[in-house]
Amino acid sequence: MKYDFDEIIDRKNTNSENVDGWRSYIFKCGPEQKFPYADDDFIRMWVADMEFAVAPEIRQAIIDRINQKILGYTIVSDHGYYDAVQKWCDDRYGWHFPKEELVFSPGVIPALYQLIEDLLQPGEKAMTFTPAYGFFLHACKYNNRELVQLPLIKDRTRYCIDFGILEKKAADPAMKLLVLCNPHNPAGRIWTEQELSHIAAIASEHGLWIISDEIHCDLIRCGLRHTPMGKIMPDYKRLITCMSASKTFNLAGMQFSHIIIRDKAERSKFIARDKTIGAVNPLSVAAHKAAYEQGGQWLEQLKAYLDGNFTYVDAFIKENFPEIAFKPPEATYFAWLDMSGLLPEAGDLPLFFANNAGVLLEGGDKMFVGNAKGHIRLNLAMPRKLLEKGLHRMKEAIAKNKRQA
């Protein structure tokens, strides 16, 4: 089957956060704040969902489940769901995990909130590489725990880990947890086996817990390969892996994720403290199972389309913004751009582009914890016509700002 990633879909009247939630999320404001652009005229390049239709195989699986007529309290009780997830991991990553280690959460974010509560006592610390996904910090703040930042080193277009800083912070007796984003959001790095092995050695030496957020693991450039931390550390009990089909198949609203917990005591604690008491959404289970069993062809075509979008952005930046050092990332559907050389006085970059270009995006330390000043993150998971329109608007806004300077 050939899938249509050029289709432009009207998402109004669907209670979409992407469409209706950007004011409160990005700008912490309501409808009282006026912008030069009508809400319908914004190009939305912000939150991490896609402007692509969910694969028809997945939509049909949801319909088939509805046609079974009863949507009562649901648990994952059949072995078939685990088999589907495990085959996906075997085929794509060469990684196997026992069925008993698989538990469920409405999402990686709720799981992070619970795991940090479980793993860190008062006075104990977590750490993560920055820039970082904002909810790594929010989950720590919610639990009154300190998150220590480990700034990544940028070598022109590629971020690298400062292992000296990692070793130093890991040696702190109060440090108990590393929250790892693998692949990394927003930098788009696929950590190499050598890098992961180095992380593993330091974590093992100091007995650290590792939460490996691998939700972006399928969204990689064609021809590249993700390595799960579980494959690097096959016997390390203090490893927890977070995965889902939600990012891969545009199912974020289905609220379903896999949390693979090796340590039996922590697994029991996580289950016992589960605020959803083990219940799951029956449509979410059907959708995710279909994604893993029938979604491979759709994903390969998606990856090729995204590669095309990145090729377009790369050429556009080289032609119009030579001040930006950019190379398409190895993973995710985000372009992480340093705008400090183009807009040194802009301050709030998301507000600048909303007001001057009618483009919604995220950026800076407020969104990405630290080591993100002057940077923006562009979501490229959209039909190319929309992407082209958004970039040309940004070009015009930057050119106008230069003329007025």
Image (spheres, rainbow, N blue to C red):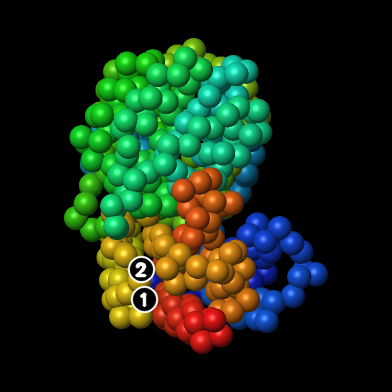
Residue 222 x %, y %: 23, 58
Q: Is residue 325 something one can see in this rendering?
A: yes
Residue 137 x %, y %: 56, 39
Q: Based on the displayed image, in which of its 4 quarters is residue 71 positioned? A: top right
Residue 338 x %, y %: 42, 62
Residue highlighted by disc 1: 321
Name the disc covering residue 129, or none.
none
Q: Residue at x 40, y 19 (%)?
A: 171
Residue highlighted by disc 2: 324
| Element marked by disc 2 | loop
Q: Name the residue nearer the viewer: 344 or 373.
A: 344
Local packing at callout 1 (Cα closer than 10 Å; few below 14, some 14-19, many 20+) is some
Identify residue type, mark 2.
Ile
Q: Is residue 113 above or below residue 315?
A: above
Q: Is residue 252 something one can see in this rendering?
A: no
Identify residue type, mark 1.
Phe
Local packing at callout 2 (Cα closer than 10 Å; few below 14, some 14-19, many 20+) is some
Q: Name the residue nearer the viewer: 42 or 54.
A: 42
Q: Quarter holding the C terminus?
A: bottom right
Q: Name the residue nearer the viewer: 69 or 230.
A: 230
